[in-house]
Amino acid sequence: MAGSKFDSKSFNPQAFGKYIDTIPQLKKNELLKSRALTPNSQIREAFSSQTGTAYAVLPMYGLLDGDVLNYDGQTDITATSTTTYERGVVVTGRAKAWTEMDFAEDITGGAGFMSNVAAQVSEYWEEVDQSILLSILNGIFSMTGARNLEFVNNHTYDITGTGDGVITPATLNTAIQKAGGDNKNKFKIAIMHSAVATNLENLNLLSYLKQTDANGIQRDLTLATWNGRTVIIDDSMPVEEAAGDAEGDSGTKYTTYILGEGAFDYENIGVKVPYEMNRDPKTNGGVDTLYSRQRKVYAPYGISYTKKSQMTLSPTNEELENGANWELVNDGNETVSKRKYINHKAIPIAKIISKG
C-alpha cells in the first residue's frame, strides 16, 4: 500500500488524510448526530471564495414580528419588516508536528504507521477541537453588558447553593426550561465531568450506550443518555476548586454543558496541505517529522465574534475565552440604546453548575 512506511519518499498525504477521516471520533460524531453541530453553506462560501479570509461578518435574518391588526373594514393595514442582524464568525487555525527517530519501529512496532499513527492523530485533533469548543463556551458565558447578561444569566443554572448542591432528577428539565422556555425540547446533548455522571449513575438516571465488537463482546461506551439526551462524559469539563467550609466540604463545582439542535454552525474550512512529511537524514542518524494543520469554524448560534481582543489572524484559546470578543447578535445600530438583539431563548446553549 502506498504510504505503508513512515518515510517521506513513500508518504501519500492525500491517502493519509482520507484514512484519518475514517477513524471514529466519538465526541464529534455524537455532536453531529444530535445536530448540535450543523453545516452552514453561508460560512463555507464566505471563507472559500476569498483568499486569505479569516474573519467575516454575515447577515442573520430575524423572524416576523409585529402586532396583528383588526380586519374590520376601518383599520388600515400597516406593514413592518424583519430585522437583519450582523454576526461575526472567525476561522480558528491550529498546527502541530511530531518528530521521532525510527518512528515506525518505536511507535508502531514495525507494523506500518498507516492505521496506528492515523488513529493517534485523529484522537489528538479530536481533543484539540474539544478544547476549542470549551474555550468558546467559556467565552460566551463570560460576556458582559445588560443584553449579553440576559443570555448569561438565563442560560446558567447554578445549584451549588441549593441543598447539597448536587444534580437531582429535576435539574436538567429546569435548566433547559430556564434557558429556552418553550424551545426546551431543542436541547439534545449534555457534556459532563465523570463526577457528575457518577452521581447520576447512583440516582439511576444515567444509562450507558453499548457497543459489540468484532468478537461479539459487548462493552459500555463513554456515552450515555439522561432523560433522553445523549451524554458525553469528559473530564476536561470545567472544574472549580473552592475553599473548604466548616464541615470540610471542598466546594468543588462542576460545569455541565447542554447543547441543542443548531447550537453551533460548523465548517471545516481546510488548508492547502493538511499533512506532510519531512525527512532529515542527518539529525540523530535520521529523523522523520509529520506536520499537520487545520482551519475550522465553530460559530455559536445567535452569538457574534467581535474580534475586539485578537492579536493575529487566528484566535488562541485564551482569546476565545475572553468575553470581550463575544456579544449577542444584533442589527449593528451605532446608537447602542436603539440596537435590536436576537431573543436569547432562541440560543440552544445552557450550562449547569453543580457540586456533583
Image (cartoon, helix red, strand yellow):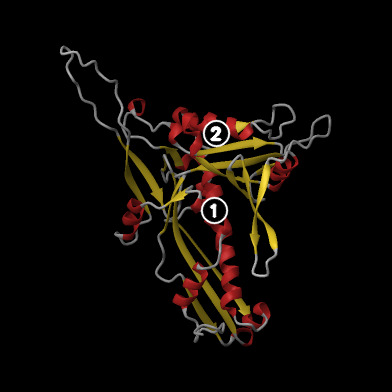
Q: What element carries label 2?
A: helix
On the image, the x and y values in percent for residue 208 come to: 67, 50
Label whose residue precedes the other's in the sequence (1 or 2): 1
On the image, the x and y values in percent for residue 10 come to: 50, 86
**Amino acid under disc 1:** Glu
Say above or below: 21 vs 338. below
The circle on residue 267 is: none
Image-based side of 39 in relation to 75, left or right = right
The circle on residue 176 is: 2
Q: Residues within 10 Å of mark 1 (few under 14, many from 20)?
A: some
Q: Please say if the residues under marks 1 and 2 sit with CB atoms less than 8 Å apart.
A: no
Residue lying at 54% horizontally and 75% vertically, measured from the top left: 290
Rendered image quadrant of residue 158: top right
Residue lying at 65% horizontally and 78% vertically, measured from the top left: 108
Residue lying at 45% horizontally and 41% vertically, measured from the top left: 326
**Amino acid under disc 2:** Ile
Q: Name the residue under label 1.
A: 30
